[in-house]
Image: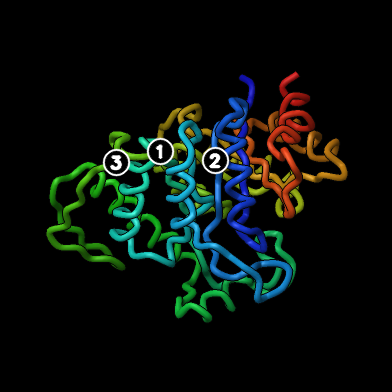
Amino acid sequence: MEPTFGLKTTPMHVPYAEIQRVWREADETPLIRDAWLWDHFLPLAGPKGGDVLEGWTLLAALAAQTSRLRLGLLVTSNRIRPPAVLGKIASTLDVISGGRLVMGLGVGGTHQPDGAGGIPGPNPAAAEYAAYGLSLVPPGEGVDRLRETIEILRAMWTEEVFDFQGRYYALEQTRNAPKPIQRPGPPLLIGGWGNRMMRLIAEYADVWNISGPPHNDLDFLADRVRRLDAELAAIGRDPASVSRSLQQVVSYDDPASTRAIVRSAVGLGFDHIVLSLPRPYPDRAVQWLVREIIEPTLG
């Protein structure tokens, strides 16, 4: 099976008009199936005072200006918005987009050692969450909170009225209308790589996403593919029911290196590749992706 492709525009140190330009071009390019943003409030690189646009607000604006692309956040932090509030936001976005939302979810900010996730230096979430009055939690708690959020989202998208009593979240007589256009709800993409996350992904995800080099090398990606297969087998779920998605930063100067990573990832079983565009975006950035990365991979 040939892989499918998406793109990601990280809204950091990039004007809105530039993101808008790339998404409009992508919407007219059939080889780009989906487009993605992120979920941070402060820059993770470059000047600390640089521009960052809020992800779900920006996604709504772009959804209203596109007609074909699947779209979402890669990935939504579960530590920022209460689950029911997130469910309402996502339902509204699916309506605005005409049923094109992919619900990207991750644990969000947790206590991590320096260099975790292949990002050099201190945990970037620490300063960001302190600046916005958000709290970091232990990784295990983060996974448990995400599990409760998923259960709440499913209920919001399918039930007329419901109560929820979990360890971390409690809801009474929750209603959510309008429902998403997609039934029983938007497909669920979960990003992560830890062992507990791989079990949760096996249980709930339609799509699993992980970052490629330099964040995670190919040996680690292969190990995580095997882990997901094992978790799926343990619960009796068909491995083919979970798409494997790789997020990969492209190199404008050395596209051959990006092509090599993509081809290796496809060989490991990844069926979807999200190509992340570094800033600044070149003119006709999407056509560059098609010409330099996608068509050679498919050809």
Residue 55 in view (yes/no): yes
Please give the name of the residue rendered at 68% of the width and 36% of the height, measured from the top-left corner.
Answer: 286
Badge 3 element: loop
**Does residue 220 appear in the picture of this structure?**
no
Q: Position of residue 287 (x, y in %)?
A: 72, 32
Q: Residues within 10 Å of mark 2 (few under 14, many from 20)?
A: many
What residue is shown with label 3? Answer: 180
Q: Sequence order check: which comes first, mark 1 or mark 3?
A: 3
Residue 11 as seen in the image, left or right of residue 65: right
Sequence-first tag of 3 and 2 = 3
Of badges 1 and 3, nearer the viewer stands: 3
Instruction: Point out the image quarter for the N terminus.
Output: top right
Question: According to the image, what is the colour scheme of the structure?
Answer: rainbow
Give the amino acid type for the residue marked by disc 2 in the picture.
Answer: Leu
State the SS at label 1.
loop
Q: Looking at the image, which residue is at 65% across and 49% down?
A: 211
* Up/down of 121 relative to 88, above or below: below
Q: Which residue is mark 1?
A: 187
Q: Amino acid at mark 3?
A: Pro
Residue matched to label 2: 228
Mark 3, mark 2: which one is toward the viewer? 3
Q: Position of residue 35 (x, y in %)?
A: 56, 41
- How far apart, in angstroms, are the residues tagged by discs 1 and 3? 11 Å
